[in-house]
Amino acid sequence: MAKSIQIIKEELSVLDLKEQIAYLESLKDDTRGGVVKLVEKVKRDVEKQIVELKRLETLTLYEKKLIHKGFQKIAGIDEVGRGPLAGPVVACAVVLNRYDLYEHINDSKKVSKKNREILFQKISDTAEDVAFGMASPEEIDELNILNATKLAMKRAIENLKEKPDHLLIDAVKLDDISIEQTNIIKGDEKSMTIAAASIMAKVTRDAMMEELGRAYPEYDFENNKGYGTASHYKGLNAVGISPIHRRSFVKDFL
């Protein structure tokens, strides 16, 4: 007696990718309309999973090469908040468990808010080490945004529980640091470890700006996160700058 469609669905739901492919093959002679539709749907889902797995494997190429060279503790470094008119620049350093792959991980700007928060929790739960560093608006004004970004990155590295033996950094080259580093342009699109740091920094800074938005409601920080939107400029025109604005970025409002 043929299995019901409901039973087939339930059995497919607990199988891994290879097992699903084999199971679908076993259904090729089942001509029931409901089964045919189910098989087509699952095949599409399987194809998407295969594409995503290939992308994730590509994202680990830098890490695999370094592991092959003998590096054990590889930290990814990225920052968020170089462009806003207000708030700190936030950097994150992440050391991932080398065996973990994170579905949908990418440059934080290319990941939905919902998936960023899911990934933030997964990385928090499974990474070997995660640490943050910040540079304040005052430090940004004093040092300029590039040097403040480097300062935030160095602070994140210093805040790790254990010193890494290699750094994968998104674009920026850090001077006066004894750890070997690889600097990758658009690294948050090319390295899973940097992408993880990008997600962690983004979620952390967004939460900070939402909290600051409650303290300074005139600027709509909850929605613009300090960037120069129409609602932000409206607040600047109405009440001027706040203590968390970067004075070097808002000179016209001083």
Image (cartoon, helix red, strand yellow):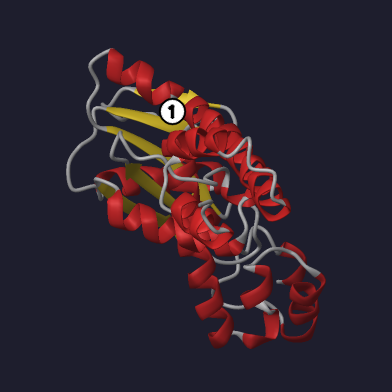
How dense is the environment of label 1, judged by Cα within 10 Å: few (below 14), some, or many (20 and up)? some
Residue 232 vertical position relative to residue 79 in the rendered view, above or below: below
Is residue 22 shown left or right of residue 27? Answer: left
User: Could you tell me the amino acid type at mark 1?
Assistant: Thr
> Which residue in the structure is indicated by mark 1?
60
| Quarter of the image where one finds residue 84 | bottom right
Q: Where does the image place residue 6, in percent across and percent down from the top left?
A: 54, 62
Residue drawn at x 65%, y 50% is 35
Residue 89 in view here: no
Question: 68 or 31: which is nearer to us?
Answer: 31
Classify 88 as above or below 189.
below
Q: Residue at x 51, y 54 (%)?
A: 3
The C terminus, quarter of image? bottom right
- Report the number of numbered marks: 1
Q: Is residue 26 visible?
A: yes
Q: Residue at x 24, y 27 (%)?
A: 165
Residue at the left extreme? 162
Question: At which x and y percent is residue 221?
Answer: 63, 75
Q: Position of residue 167 (x, y in %)?
A: 35, 30
The foreground one among 216 and 97 is: 97
Residue lying farthest to the top in this orientation: 69
- Helix, strand or loop at disc 1? loop
Q: Residue at x 24, y 47 (%)?
A: 160
